[in-house]
Amino acid sequence: MKPIYFDNNATTPIAPEVLNEMLPYLRELYGNPSSMHTFGGQLHRKIEEARVKVADLINAEIEEIIFTSCGTESDNTAIMSAIESYPRKRHVITTRVEHPAVLNFCKHLVRKGYRVTFLPVDKFGRLEMEVFLKAIDDDTAVVSIMYANNETGVVFPIKDIGEILQERKILFHTDAVQAVGKVLIDVKELPVDMLSLSGHKLHAPKGVGALYVRKGTRFYPYIIGGHQERGRRAGTENVASIIALGKACELAKGYLNEEAGYLSRLRDKLERALLELCPDAQVNGDRENRLPNTTNMSFQYVEGEAILLRLNEYGICASSGSACTSGSLEPSHVLRAMGIPFTAIHGSIRFSLSHYNTEDEVDKVIEVMPSIIRELRTLSPYGKEKMQG
Ligand code: PLP
């Protein structure tokens, strides 16, 4: 059975055009792009063609794109490069709601003796600008703030933050892994020094990413070895996946203009219906500044895991902010940072869409969810009490 896949912030299906483009480089064209012979050497040109396409999607210059193995590597590289480039500065600023690729790297820096400010967010998952302004000081080497949150879809005011940091001459990195391919990003308009993206969030395969580094930004490589990526990221290139990422970016550029309207129409239909049909439901996060494909909803007095298991029986894939299903022992750090009550965190579900989703699929979720929630509440002692009361 083909799944009804509403978990696109976790990963996306590879676009058929992308798969077609990459397959020859896994089969017959297996050379090493650093080789002197044509068989390998010709791949170098293909990598450069892919670089043009990635750069084009975010309006960057070609030499500003470094291919990496994933979003996590891009994030780690950006922060590490900043602190290596400014060794006297020992302070880093980030937020409490970052992906572990940034959050845990920053916790690692704390253990190494760096001072890290983890900025709070308000109950809508928004940054408190006053607190951010107060956190900046002369010791700050880099600020890393995500473009959009993977759990709630909340979009941060990256332009405003970047303008402040540009004036203070402090490096600014944004983890745009969830934003690239979903919303228009133009680095000529956006005052960021570094920006991370990941292939598998935009219909390319897992295990490939890129880091944008603005021309003139001091850069220190994280992976040291050969001369690949002009000495900025060693290791024999993942040729097929880089070509795939290029193709995915080219496709995204083509569909981006219609994407947001289509996705938000489906997402809003789903959200409105579930709010109406399921009592004690709420949307988590700022509904104004949000990715068009994401909704994070809480259904009080039920367990997110139980909802997911029941949805799974209908072939519907989503994810939950509660423990276990999120792959961690702790319930969502993002929802906790927002001060969402535990009863709501435990019953939270994230639906994240892509342009491969259809209105029929949304209708199917709308059809099954209310009875799932009703049923689960009759099984939970607290839920039963609430329903009777
Ligand atoms: N940053 C964000 C916001 C993400 O959502 C993810 C993946 O979920 C990552 C970074 C890590 O990307 P990757 O899985 O390519 O390492």
Image (tube, rainbow, N blue to C red):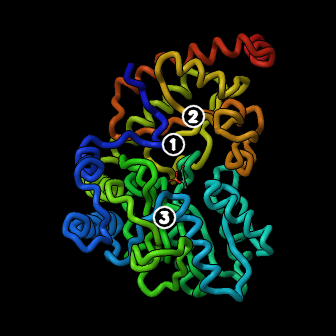
Q: Which residue is tagged 1?
A: 10
Q: Amino acid at mark 1?
A: Ala
The secondary element bearing badge 2 is classed as: strand
Q: Can I make out residue 257 in this image?
A: no
User: Which is nearer the eye, 382 or 318?
Assistant: 318
Q: Position of residue 208 (x, y in %)?
A: 43, 56
Characterize the local packing of mark 3: few (<14), some (14-19) or many (20 or more) Cα atoms within 10 angstroms. many
User: Which is nearer the eye, 4 or 277?
Assistant: 4
Residue 245 is labelled as none
Q: Amino acid at mark 3?
A: Ser
Give the mark nearest the N terminus, 3 or 1. 1
Q: What residue is drawn where x is 29% and y is 66%?
A: 47
Q: Which residue is tagged 2?
A: 319
Specify the quadrant of the image occupied by residue 35: bottom left
Q: Position of residue 171 (x, y in %)?
A: 57, 80
Q: Is residue 157 above or below residue 91?
A: above
Characterize the local packing of mark 1: few (<14), some (14-19) or many (20 or more) Cα atoms within 10 angstroms. some
Q: Do tag 2 and tag 1 residues touch (Cβ < 8 Å)?
A: yes
The secondary element bearing badge 1 is classed as: loop
Cα–Cα span, label 2 and label 1: 8 Å
